[in-house]
Amino acid sequence: MNKTIGIIMIALGIIMLIWTGFTYTKKEKIIDAGPIQVSADRQKSVNWSPYAGGILVIGGVIVLVTAKKSA
């Protein structure tokens, strides 16, 4: 079980190191006056620090190494 968690943490960490965020489009209503509606597309972005990916990789390695020693 701990080996699986360690491998998942390492994989997520590597993905977070390579891919540092993403952007998505959200449709928002600007005016809603009865039958008249005006909406606009707004771009939102989600970014994370590459340090978070590094911490996940290091944590995954630690979990993986301690799982080998205890098994």
Image (tube, rainbow, N blue to C red):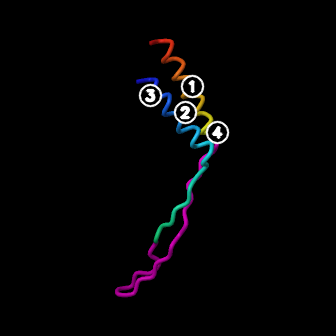
Could you give the CA–CA distance between mark 1 and mark 2, rounded to whole angstroms?
Answer: 7 Å
Return the disc, 1 or 2, that comes first in the chain's sequence: 2
Q: Amino acid under label 4?
A: Tyr
Q: Label 2 belongs to which residue?
A: 10
Mark 3–mark 4 distance (CA, rounded to whole Å): 22 Å
| Mark sitting earlier along the chain (3/4) | 3
Categorize mark 1 by other alpha carbons within 10 Å: few (<14), some (14-19), many (20+). some
Q: Secondary structure at mark 2?
A: helix
State how far apart marks 4 and 2 are (Cα): 13 Å
CA gap between label 3 and label 1 equals: 11 Å
Name the mark nearer the viewer: 3 or 4: 3
Residue 14 falls within the magenta-colored stretch: no
Q: Secondary structure at mark 1?
A: helix
> Nearest the camera: 69 or 34?
69
Query: Dot 4 lies on which element?
Result: helix
C-beta proximity under 8 Å, tags 1 and 4: no
Q: Earlier in the sequence, mark 3 or mark 1?
A: 3
Contact between labelled residues 1 and 3, with CB atoms less than 8 Å apart: no
Which of 66/49 is in front?
A: 66
Q: Residue furthest bottom?
A: 35
Q: Position of residue 47 (x, y in %)?
A: 59, 52
Q: Secondary structure at mark 3?
A: helix
